[in-house]
Amino acid sequence: MPMALPSPPLHALWQRTRQRWARRQLSDPAYAFLFDPPPPDEYVALDCETTGLNTRTDDIISIGAVRIRGRRILTSERLELLVQPQCQVPAESIRVHRLRTMDVAHGLPVQEAMHRLLHFIGSRPLVGYYLEFDVAMLNRAVRPLIGIRLPQPQIEVSRLYYDYRFRQLPPYQQHDNADIDLRFDTLMADLDLPVREAHDALNDAVMAAMAFIRLRELQG
């Protein structure tokens, strides 16, 4: 089960405190826009493909991101980047995302990719499926550039889905660690959403955006 967050008032206070601290630590004032008020009801769904699953040693090789405004996914406002890794892409990773070393050899240097991504996101909250991994990978590249980790609020789609399914359980099953299937295929099927080809960064970002919008609608 995703990690529990503080209650809403405490969570909001924690977010404000974190934002103030991060702004003081920002090493390049050119990125102060990351702390501007976000455009109303706008978000950015994102996903990364990587050379592996180790957030300390593996590299990002592609990034997909798309803006959300209200209940609309703005596919005309999307970002697709190939990123040069510092190592060879292992065969087991190629079998997942089908990106070979030769495919990303002429991608962007990681710092340029982060620069473009930060300007695309701005101060909008981030949306994703198991977003913690993608953010950890991005933070490794972002921190040398601006001195801080990504400061935007983060919205975990699997957490929204867990809360939605938890409310549907009979009272005797509503307890910590309730058995709820959080696999992405299960989530998309249960929400009756179309599925795109997986393990493509932009496709995964768009599917996370669809799930986010549907779950917001179901919350009323």
Image (tube, helix red, strand yellow):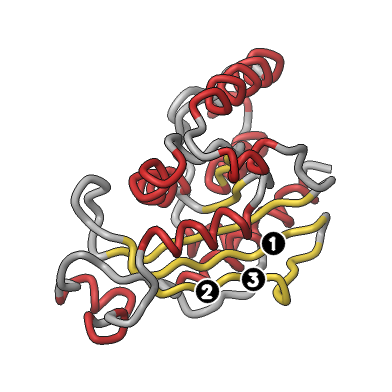
- Kindly report the distance in space between the C-alpha atoms of the residues bearing marks 3 and 2: 7 Å
* Front-lying residue, 143 or 164: 143
What residue is rendered at 33% in x and 62% in y? 60
**Label 3 belongs to which residue?**
78
Residue underneath mark 2: 80
Residue lying at 63% horizontally and 60% vertically, measured from the top left: 120
- Give the residue drawn at x 31%, y 79%: 104
**Image coords of residue 6 (percent x, y):** 58, 18
Q: Which residue is located at x 66 percent, y 34 percent?
A: 167
Whether residues under marks 3 and 2 lie with C-beta atoms below 8 angstroms apart, the answer is yes
Disc with the residue nearer the chain's start (2 vs 1): 1
Q: Nearer the viewer, residue 157 or 81?
A: 81
Q: Tag 1: Cα neighbours inside 10 Å, few (<14), some, or many (≥20)?
A: many
Please name the amino acid that badge 2 sits on.
Glu
Q: Secondary structure at mark 2?
A: strand
* Viewer-side residue, 176 vs 138: 138
> Residue 211: percent from the left, percent from the top?
64, 58
Would you place residue 90 above or below residue 167 in this image?
Answer: below
The reply to whether dot 1 and dot 3 touch (C-beta < 8 Å) is yes
**Distance (Cα) linking label 1 and label 3:** 6 Å
Does the CB distance between marks 2 and 1 fall below 8 Å? no
Q: Earlier in the sequence, mark 1 or mark 3?
A: 1
Q: CA distance from mark 2 to mark 1?
A: 12 Å
Res 174 visible: yes
